[in-house]
Amino acid sequence: MQLDILLTNGLCYTMEEEGHFVEAIGIKDGFIRFAGSSEAAKALDAKEVIDLDGKTVIPGMADAHMHMYAHCQNLALVDLQGARSMDDMIARLKEKAAKTPKGHWIKGVNFDQSKFIENRFPTKIDLDQVSNEHPIVIKRCCLHAVVANSLALEMAGVTKGYEGGSGGIVEVNASGEPNGILREQSTKIFDEIIPDPLADEAEKLKMMDLVFKDMSSKGITGIHTYAAKIWRYDEDIELYRAIDQEGRLPVRVTVCMDDLFEPEVLTEQDKANPNRLVQYGAYKLFTDGSLGSRSAALQAPYSDEPENKGFLVASQEALNEKVKIAYRKGLQPAIHAIGDAALDMTLTSIENCLETMRLEGMTEEEMAKRLPFRIIHVQMLDVSLLERMKKLPVILDIQPIFLCTDMNWIEDRIGTGRMRYAYAWKTLWDEGFIQTGGSDCPVESYDPMVGVYAAVTRKNLEGQPKAGFYPEEKLSVYEALALFTKNVHFATGQSKVLGTLSCGKFADLVVLSENPFEIEPDYLLQIQVLKTFVAGKQVYAVEGK
């Protein structure tokens, strides 16, 4: 057999178990056909031989939870991520207003009031300083809150006496007038009327191409992208399939929807095809908001806002019914749960679903063949919730990079007593849970090495605190890389074909500039991706490397 590509003279960490590596990898027709020593590889014939010169190879990395199309849209908007004060935010929006015709919408994204020197939410009064001739809306980095200026509120019909509807909040000032801040379900009124910045098809495809190329440069070989109609974060599987058919898709895309859909019927041949890059994934459901906007549902009040426990965006009965309907259809429920009250509701819905299925005659063997339930975020636990989870078929989709931001205020939000089981990744690992790594992009960067750094060091991007934030919950480099490599594919039932550098698996792999297992953890952020392969095809390479 003549191989297509032979990579030799390297440190190829298979991720099958900690510390295990081979020196050479042989690829044929999109599969790994050889994994062994460089000496044994000398006997092999290959069309192309790549001398790794001692470089490190790991399986391709993936993002288990993000919003791809939303990220592309945000790139066309005003990015407020770097704003550190109200004046800074206003200046950035004014710059956009100066270039925008009067009456046209201005939208800002990624603001975080906890990073402002004023440490408060903007209101319509602040945004009115930007312009009274443009409708302006800015969205918090967590996506669960927006702020609008007076003109935008007027155009949306959000005036005195406006009802935010079920699962939403419209804040008011002392006179009962909306102050410009809307949370959760109430925010969607603006998403329904603000034009898509990528409505032009050519511009949309150009932006998506740029993002995919950037993903490849960061070693990403797969993403799970989620629709979220609450924010008009649409996802169209046919768009990804069209890009793939044109030979322009360098990343595996799993599309997860928040409307019911018909599950794909795949043959064994389909499942074993390394070139099948686009597929349907989970069915997304919400229970609460975010800790950053104090809308995550807690069992006890917020420590820094004692009258507030956040809120649930659905009733227990409604969630139970949606989970059962999805499960009967053969879909995989993926449930957003950040606060401990939301996690309690989520576990109850899963317990209820499984008990109902048993009563309806489904056998334990049939249920064991189903994909596990996915719980997204899981930022707050307690002992009782942990014990309940251990009895259920669940996979936990976490975002380590959240801690880089949240550590600035999370202890104030929930108090030291509740921190024991917050962002408790090592506890979850030791209890045997499969955790997958993601970013929730555009909330945070999709660079997986940043997520690995966050999980290993538990420091912010400036390297603080020196010992790490609650360092007992640090993961090892192997454990953190597992989140972004092999673990992701357990969520989609593809662990037999993806996730490790093993013979017979799809040839998705990444060549790194440094060995993450040997360098100091603080230097993980400096690792560069030199080459990226998907199904044995090189989709990215640093010139000359």
Image (cartoon, grey):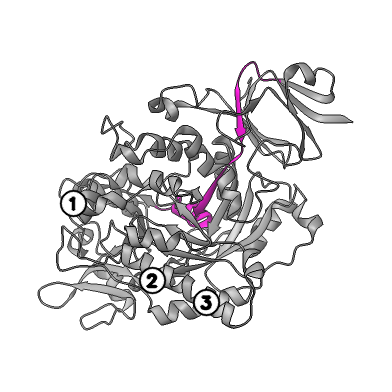
Q: Amino acid under label 3?
A: Glu
Q: Which residue is mark 1?
A: 412
Q: Is residue 69 above or below residue 91?
A: below
- The answer to whether one can see residue 37 in this image is yes
Horizontal side of 87 relative to 137 (left or right) equals left
Residue 182, percent from left and from top: 28, 69
Q: Amino acid under label 1?
A: Asp
Of the pair 80 and 389, the residue shown nearer to us: 389
Are the two marked residues, 3 and 1, in contact with CB atoms closer than 8 angstroms?
A: no
Q: Amino acid under label 2?
A: Met
Horizontal side of 423 relative to 532 (left or right) equals left
Residue 279, percent from left and from top: 67, 59
Residues rendered magenta in the picture: 51-77
Q: Residues within 10 Å of mark 3 (few under 14, many from 20)?
A: few
Quarter assignment of residue 298: bottom left
State which mark lies toward you, 3 or 2: 3
Quarter assignment of residue 308: bottom left
For marks 1 and 2 on the same chain, the one whose residue lies earlier in the sequence: 2
Q: Which residue is mark 2?
A: 345
Of the pair 391 and 326, the residue shown nearer to us: 391
Residue 352, percent from left and from top: 48, 76
Q: Is residue 7 above or below residue 136?
A: above
- Distance of mark 3 from mark 2, alpha carbons? 15 Å
Are the two marked residues, 1 and 2, in contact with CB atoms closer than 8 angstroms?
A: no
Q: Which residue is mark 3?
A: 355
